[in-house]
């Protein structure tokens, strides 16, 4: 069965990595999940369809904002490396398309 996953571009729009989420926990509007890259973890709040949060890895931290579609099957938004660093595109999908490379993601 496909896992929740997403796309997070690297240094340019042509490279991406796919990281399935695990240990997803939701309490009220708080959401926490882990992913297998540099001890990755996302944490934040879900208000309506908007997830506002942060990511942490052994090599850095940053911000993250995703807006989900009406059925919580896909979300688009951005991530950055904290502070005033450039925002990079992020896509989140409940089911990752076969053969597509792709980054960070919530909601199982």
Image (spheres, rainbow, N blue to C red):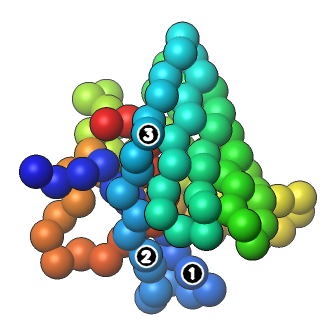
Q: Residues within 10 Å of mark 1 (few under 14, many from 20)?
A: few
- The circle drawn on residue 10 is 1
Q: Secondary structure at mark 2?
A: strand
Residue 23: which numbered mark, if any? 3
Does residue 70 appear left or right of residue 96 in this picture? Answer: right
Q: Position of residue 95 (x, y in %)?
A: 21, 51
Judging from the image, what secondary structure is the residue with disc 1 in? loop
- Residue ranking furthest to the top: 28
Lower position in the chain sequence, tag 2 or tag 1: 1
- Looking at the image, do the residues carrying marks 2 and 1 touch, with CB atoms under 8 Å apart? yes
Q: Secondary structure at mark 3?
A: strand
- Residue, x 70% and y 55% (percent of image)? 56
- Quarter of image, res 108: top left
| Closest to the observer, 96 or 14 | 96
- On the image, the x and y values in percent for residue 79 come to 64, 59
| Location of mark 2 (residue) | 17
Give the Cα separation between the discs numbered 2 and 3.
Answer: 19 Å
């Amino acid at each position: 069965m496909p896992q929740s996953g997403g796309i997070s571009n690297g240094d340019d729009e042509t490279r991406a990595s796919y990281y399935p989420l695990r240990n997803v926990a939701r309490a009220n509007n708080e959401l926490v999940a882990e992913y297998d890259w540099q001890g990755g973890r996302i944490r934040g709040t879900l208000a309506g369809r908007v997830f506002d949060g942060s990511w942490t890895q052994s090599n850095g931290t940053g911000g993250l904002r995703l807006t989900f579609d009406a059925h919580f099957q896909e979300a688009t938004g951005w991530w950055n490396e904290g502070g005033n660093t450039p925002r990079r595109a992020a896509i989140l999908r409940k089911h990752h398309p076969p053969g597509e490379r792709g980054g960070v993601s919530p909601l199982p």
